[in-house]
Image (cartoon, rainbow, N blue to C red):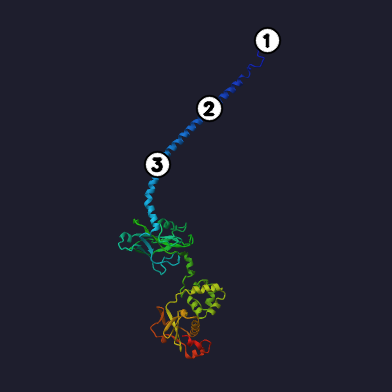
Amino acid sequence: MPAKRLLEGGGGGDSPSPARSPALKKRCRSFDLEIRGCRHLEEMVTNCVQRVEAAVESVIESAISRIPEAVTKAITGYLSRAPSLCRTVVDQNQPPRYKLRFLNGLSNEIFTKKGIRAANGDPLKICLEDNNQQENNSHRLLSAKIKIVVLDGDFNIDNEDCWILENFSRHIVRPRDKIGAVLTGELELSLKNGKADLRDATFIDNSKFTRSGKFRLGVMVVDELGERILEGVTEPFTVKDRRGEGSQKHDIPSLDDDVWRLQKISKDGVFHEALKGSGIFSVKDFLTSYYKDEHTLRKVLKKATKLVWTTIVDHAKKCDPGKELYSFIVEGHDVVLFFNCFYRIVGVTSSDQYTPFKNLDQRMQGRVEQWSKVAYETWTNLQPDYVMDNGKPRPINQSISQGSIMLEPKFMQGHQQSKYCPHACHLF
């Protein structure tokens, strides 16, 4: 009997124990919740994907619907620009009928805060030109409003006859920060009968900051006249700070310039002091000393190298000597020598026949140079007595004999004993 009760009590171990039943139920509930959570997450993902697909589909449909409109707008815009594009092609290959031009040029160097003038000191002159050379130009063209601008010096570096407006505009120089306008003054003018003068314009900034280190002035039409008018431009030039004007070297020195204006001679420098110590203060003094006695002048500048010496002399020789001449009669030989204002021999007259010095052969030039030395030794307080007129000397209101210095016969005789004078009469 005890064994039977044991058997009925489930001693085989296959029936669940009443003590484990709550744990099993808890696990089942947890598993059920996880399954439900996964299903909910799946539904959320599905809904999200559907919304994204719907949004993308809407965007694509909208973009596709706008493509014809965008294409139409692009084609319309291109067609509207076609005349302008055609004009651009024409501008590049055929000069416009009308163009602006500067009639006079600027100096190679200009200084800031100093009124702009042409190289000869006149106002810059501007005119409107008609390439067809017709006279029936409209009043609007002849009285058009124009504007002066500053261009980079490398604009139109190839010197082309024409250009497009866009290229011209790209080269207009813009003001630097903290500097202000590059050019100030009355920069907008009105043509009067196709002409205008630039009288009030001043550079504020120098040209060092540009690509080329130089500027050009440009002039363009402000009014819309319905026809392309080619802009005018000057040659390139350098704009320097006005503080450097006091020590400026002139490209072409004048006779009255201080001698330190010559290249390689610094103001108050070694060469300048040496020249002043020898009584050479101006460019004219330098040239006079050079032609009268080059050897002595070279001693004054003995510290100068050969290259420096050549540079100084070549720069000085660029001077315009003017037309005034000094004559010297070599008595007894019917010969008259002519010198310019700094005593350079320019020509010889023999038997009323004038010959420029450069046209003489080497032997004759040597004879004339020897006579020139005699003239240098005898001249004092000379006044010009001739002028160069059409390549020939012409007396200044006086005869040759009155205005010339004669070599005294006895003085000439003294020099006839030298190696060159006995045969001087055979020169001509």
Residue depicted at 41% across the width and 41% down the height: 67
Left or right: where 273 falls relative to 237? right
Identify which residue is drawn at 52% across, 29% down: 42
Give me the C-alpha separation between circle 3 and circle 2.
45 Å
The amino acid on which the numbered mark 1 sits, given as a three-letter code, is Lys
> Can you tell which mark lies on residue 4?
1
Q: Nearer the viewer, mark 3 or mark 2?
A: 3
At which x and y percent is residue 288?
A: 49, 79
In front of the other: 268 or 264: 264
Of the numbered discs 3 and 1, the one sitting upstream in the chain is: 1
| Residue type of the residue flagged with mark 2 | Arg
Disc 1 and disc 2: Cα gap in Å? 50 Å
Q: CA distance from mark 3 to mark 1?
A: 94 Å
Q: Is residue 220 visible?
A: no
Q: Looking at the picture, tell me which residue is in the foreground, 112 or 376.
A: 376
- SS type, badge 2: helix
